[in-house]
Image (cartoon, rainbow, N blue to C red):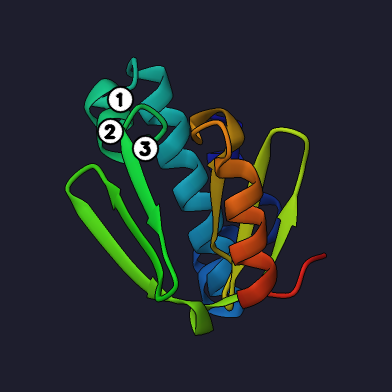
Amino acid sequence: MFLFLLPSQSGGWQALLMWNPPRALFYFALGVLDLWIAAGSPGGKRLNRVVNRLGVERHIRINDRGLLATHGSKTFDQQWSYFRFFQETPNLFVLQTVGTMFWTVPKRTLPPKGTEQLRALLMAKLPQR
């Protein structure tokens, strides 16, 4: 709650809003967040269900054309040109997109010879880093 006292040292909220609107907005948003937490985070469980996608089952199919992924109710159909490169770790393949998004393919989900087949396909389609 101390956030509501901060601007009073420099001429008040009006001066802060006039001379530095982004900072005033930030302080206001932080104050609202403080109040929301102090009120017991009403709607927090529902918000977590909407935002948290870790518990959503996903299916990925990779072929010569690209990647088809189903993630909950969403479907992504991406051609190889959408990806910049791939990386391989001991446990998974990471496919980096042209943006900041990436796809992971856990090796444990692949059939017995699937790791070698996927590696060969990825090496033919994308650079490895």
What is the quadrant of the C terminus in the image?
bottom right
Marks 3 & 1, CB-CB < 8 Å contact:
no
Say whether residue 19 is visible.
Answer: yes
Cα separation between marks 3 and 1: 15 Å
Q: Residue furthest top?
A: 40
Q: Nearer the viewer, residue 1 or 77?
A: 77
Q: What distance separates the C-alpha of mark 3 from that of mark 2?
A: 11 Å
Residue that numbered label 2 is attached to? 47
What amino acid does circle 3 point to? Arg
Q: CA distance from mark 1 to mark 2?
A: 5 Å
Tell me residue 125's x, y (percent). 61, 76
Q: Which residue is mark 1?
A: 44
Name which quarter of the figure residue 64 lies in. bottom left
Q: Are marks 3 and 2 in contact (CB under 8 Å)?
A: no
For image coordinates 23% across by 42% down, the residue present is 72
Total count of labels: 3
> Badge 3, how many Cα within 10 Å: few under 14, some, many 20+?
few
Q: Vertically, is 2 above or below 99?
A: above
Q: Which residue is mark 3?
A: 53
Comparing marks 3 and 2, which lies closer to the viewer? 3
Q: Position of residue 69 (x, y in %)?
A: 33, 55
- Residue 9 locus on image (x, y percent): 70, 51
